[in-house]
Image (cartoon, grey):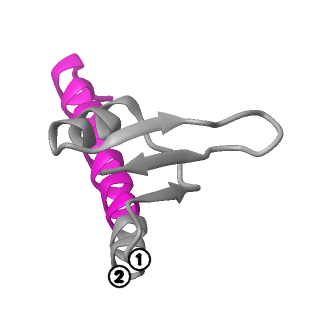
């Protein structure tokens, strides 16, 4: 069994790993759009609060257009 400290550290690392994965997905979407000369892109990957906060820090605007019918959809613009 994990100690409380170990459990907390594992949970924090998991969140961090998920954020990294989400940032890579967003980066892939952004790179494709930039190559096409676009100023925004729809990203169909789920982006969590930490990921959105990091993108905002980097100067991106992120709008959540997700819904139950279509799933996760985010508009990222710059």
Q: In which quarter of the image is residue 62?
A: top left
Q: Distance between the residues labelled 1 and 2?
A: 5 Å
Pick the front one: 55 or 19: 55
Residue 57 lies, with reference to residue 20, above or below; the image says above
Q: Which residue is drawn at 62% across and 44% down?
A: 72
Q: In this view, does 59 lie to the left or right of 17?
A: left
Circle 2: element type: helix
Front label number (1 vs 2): 2
Which residue matches tag 1? 32
Q: In which quarter of the image is the N terminus?
A: top left
Is residue 8 one of those drawn in magenta?
Answer: yes
Residue 57 lies, with reference to residue 75, above or below; the image says above
Q: Which residue lies furthest to the top in this view?
A: 4
Q: In which quarter of the image is residue 36?
A: bottom left
State which region is magenta.
1-27
Q: How crowded is mark 2: few (under 14 residues within 10 Å), some or many (20 or more)?
A: few
Circle 1: element type: helix
Pick the front one: 11 or 47: 47
Q: Residue at x 16, y 37 (%)?
A: 57
């Amino acid at each position: 069994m994990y100690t409380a400290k170990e459990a907390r550290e594992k949970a924090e690392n998991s969140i961090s790993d998920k954020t990294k994965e989400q940032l890579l997905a967003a980066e892939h979407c952004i790179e494709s759009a930039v190559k096409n000369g676009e100023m925004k892109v729809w990203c169909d990957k789920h982006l969590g609060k930490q990921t959105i906060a990091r993108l905002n820090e980097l100067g991106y605007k992120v709008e959540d257009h997700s819904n139950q019918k279509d799933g996760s959809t985010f508009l990222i613009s710059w």
